[in-house]
Image: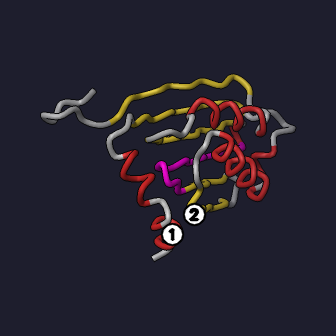
Amino acid sequence: MPGMEAASSYTDLRRQEAVSAKRLYAIDALCPPDSPVSDVGQLTDIAVAAVAAGGGHVLDASHVVFPNGAITLVLILAESHLSIHTWPEEDLIALDLFSCGAIDGQRVIDELASGLRLVAVSVTEVERGLHPGGRSR
């Protein structure tokens, strides 16, 4: 199973994060012409570096490049995941960072916005998870 070896080295980290706050950061932005979002290698390198800057740990990565040049990139993190979707015909990028534990989500977002030269960045933060008794936060 892909990623099992990498994931097993983070068992203690995952135990700590199981009881920590969980957040979804939904980010929409525009990509100017000089943005490297159309190059899957650069996109992956920038995303991995952003996660590391935020204190996260990438376990695995997968991507698809569509015929129109759109890219979907998913990074599996010890702290959850980062997904990136591009729409070149609209100069649009949508990112979802689901995090738990000590990863600094805002730092990851700031690094992505800077490295990808994004403009008109909109961030929606949603707390996830259930309180004891089954009620959402």
| Number of dots carrying numbers | 2
Compared with 19, 30 (above or below) is above
Residue drawn at 59 percent across, 38 percent down: 94
Instruction: Tell me if residue 97 is in the magenta stretch.
Output: no
Callout 2: SS: strand
Disc 1 residue crowd, few under 14, some 14–19, many 20+, Cα 10 Å: few
Which SS type dominates the magenta stretch?
strand
Residue nearer the viewer, 83 or 78: 78
Q: Which residues are magenta?
A: 76-88
| Pointers 2 and 1 in contact (C-beta within 8 Å) | yes
Where residue 108 appears, x then y in whole percent? 63, 37
- Report the residue that reaches farthest toward the left: 133
Amino acid type at image mark 2: Asp
Asked which quadrant contains residue 121, the reply is top right
Quarter of the image that includes the N terminus: bottom left
Residue drawn at 17 percent across, 34 percent down: 132
Q: Is residue 100 left or right of residue 60?
A: left
Q: Which residue is mark 1?
A: 3
Q: Is residue 126 left or right of residue 33?
A: left
Disc 2 residue crowd, few under 14, some 14–19, many 20+, Cα 10 Å: some
Quarter of the image that includes the C terminus: top left
Where residue 123 appears, x then y in whole percent? 56, 25
Residue 18: mark: none
Residue nearer the viewer, 15 or 39: 15
Residue nearer the viewer, 124 or 135: 135
Label 2 – label 1 distance at C-alpha: 6 Å
Compared with 85, 64 (above or below) is below
Residue drawn at 72 percent across, 48 percent down: 49
Q: Which residue is mark 2?
A: 60
Where residue 39 appears, x then y in whole percent? 79, 54
